[in-house]
Image: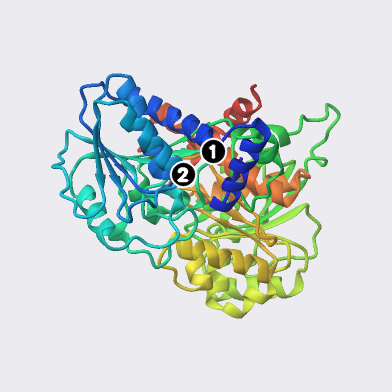
Amino acid sequence: MKIFTNEALRKIDDATIASEGITRLDLMERAASAVAYEIISRWRATKRMVIFAGPGDNGGDALAVARMLYEQGYRPEVYLFNIRSSHLSDCCAANRRRLIDMGDVDFNEIVDNFTPPELGPDDVVIDGLFGAGLHSPLKGGYTSLVQYINNSDAYIVAIDMPSGLFCEWNEGSDRRNIIRADLTLTFASKRLSFFFSENAEFIGQCIVLDIDLDPTAIATTPADYYLIEKEDVREKLRPLDPFISKYDNGSLYLIAGSYGMMGAAILAARSAQRIGTGLVTVHGPASANVIMQTSCPEALFEADESNICTTSINSKRRFSVIALGPGMGTNDETVDAIDHFLKNFRNPCLLDADALNCIAKRSMLLRSIPKGSIITPHAREFDRLFGKNVTDEERFKRAINVSKNHKITIVLKGHYTMMVRPDGKVYINSSGNPGMATAGSGDVLTGMIAGLISQGYTPDNSVWMAVYIHGHAGDLAAAKNSQQSLIASDIIDNIGPAILDIKRQ
């Protein structure tokens, strides 16, 4: 699913209006109907509802919702802010007339001074002040109103967007002046800012409402951001050729593990096998031979000269894909091995965990990462490599620049794992749960990405497919045993069931 910018969604609205021969007011009616349905499905008509409407189209949505609620027996209190009298948008003005024409409505139009209604925890506030129509941070009396609403303990429903929050970038915004919604009812698709952790407190639960926008316009409107869903993965998964051999399913060379951290190597190797890799060879410290042979008998083991860590990497052997990092440690000898490997290996590879931490110890090695490679940092690993970031938004913007400049794909792991490509396209994952924030989960993902690449899937597709399957496997595991009890091995055990479920129509 495409994640559109606010500008792109406006163009899709215009295309819908043109293709259906309707007016903008008709489209607003459609959106308001979807919002009213969600509200009616949650609360009885006896619930006190207070609606705050701004002078723009978001206010028009709110006034239309108020009218529909009145028609269903609700009695909301409506406050329309028209501070600069006669500056309502056309649709807002039209819905103002429609609401007033109903007669017995509790309608208050604010043109100068405003005494706010008393609000409490038993009330529902519907925010229709500005939504996505905001072009600059809130100021003046609106900041006081937002803070008053936020401090009221009322349940807050935002129409389209919490007022004060921008659809894409919120750097420099005063967080005190943004509505903290408990429920956000947005249209067509989630907005990019919804995927940054620092904005979660403003959005609450988010429901995307389908308002039947023109499908041709949606299909032809370009987007840089995409939400990965089950159907996307289903379309790409290939059936196995009945005459296939293990060699056809590719080979993975996995440099992983060190003394005391061989679990990471085992998890990565097992996940690569579970997702279908034909041959997995693990290179690790010599002391790990018995551990690997007993814990992962299907994998080959190549012993390093050291009993403790990796001190050399054979970059001349031919494999479908090479992955480095899980549990390697950051001993000086290992950093030297990574240094030598990156300066002599020119094909794309997969770098994770301690491979990235080794590079962070010698930042000049960033220039030696082969073009087309994939790195899979979590937030702390990313910041070690590229500098401290205060917010997810800041880190996201930096990842786009780094990916473009170094011509590498960056997998930013988190609640919404984001895959950033050198061409500026970003794929955001929709599967997974908080229980997956556990030791070894990233090692499992490394094996899965490498495993799909080894089987001939393009690196770009392998990344987002593996990330979604990884999250879906975690969801299945949590459904069986709870999020709290989830461990990385549970994800591996559910890779097969996840693939079966994704293939199921």
Where is residue 286? Give x, y as percent. 61, 60
* Residue 313 picture quarter: bottom right
Q: What residue type is labelled 2?
A: Asp
Residue type, label 1: Arg
Q: Where is residue 268 in the image (x, y as percent from the top left)?
A: 59, 48
Residue 113 visible within the image? yes
Report the quarter where the N terminus lies: top right
The disc placed on residue 485 is none
Camera-side residue of 79 and 320: 79
Tag of residue 90: 2
Q: Does dot 1 land on a helix, a strand or a loop?
A: helix
Instruction: Tell me the quarter of the picture where residue 20 sits.
Output: top right
**In the image, is residue 39 above or below residue 72?**
below
- Residue of label 1: 24
Q: How crowded is mark 2: few (under 14 residues within 10 Å), some or many (20 or more)?
A: some
Location of residue 314 with respect to 93 vertically, above or below: below
Which residue is located at x 49 percent, y 40 percent?
432
Q: Where is residue 149 in the image (x, y as percent from the top left)?
A: 22, 48
Label pair 2/1, CB-CB below 8 angstroms: yes
Residue at the image position 61 percent from the left and 80 percent from the top: 364
Q: Residue at x 13, y 42 (%)?
A: 118
Of the image marks 2 and 1, the number of the one nearer the N terminus: 1
Q: Badge 1, how many Cα within 10 Å: few under 14, some, many 20+?
A: some
- Residue 237 x/y as whole percent: 72, 34
Residue placed most toward the observer, 76 or 460: 76
Question: Which quarter of the image is occupied by the C terminus?
Answer: top right
Residue at the outermost right position: 243
> Left or right: 101 with respect to 389?
left
In the image, taking residue 444 as reference, residue 403 lies left or right, namely: right
Distance of mark 2 from mark 1, alpha carbons?
9 Å
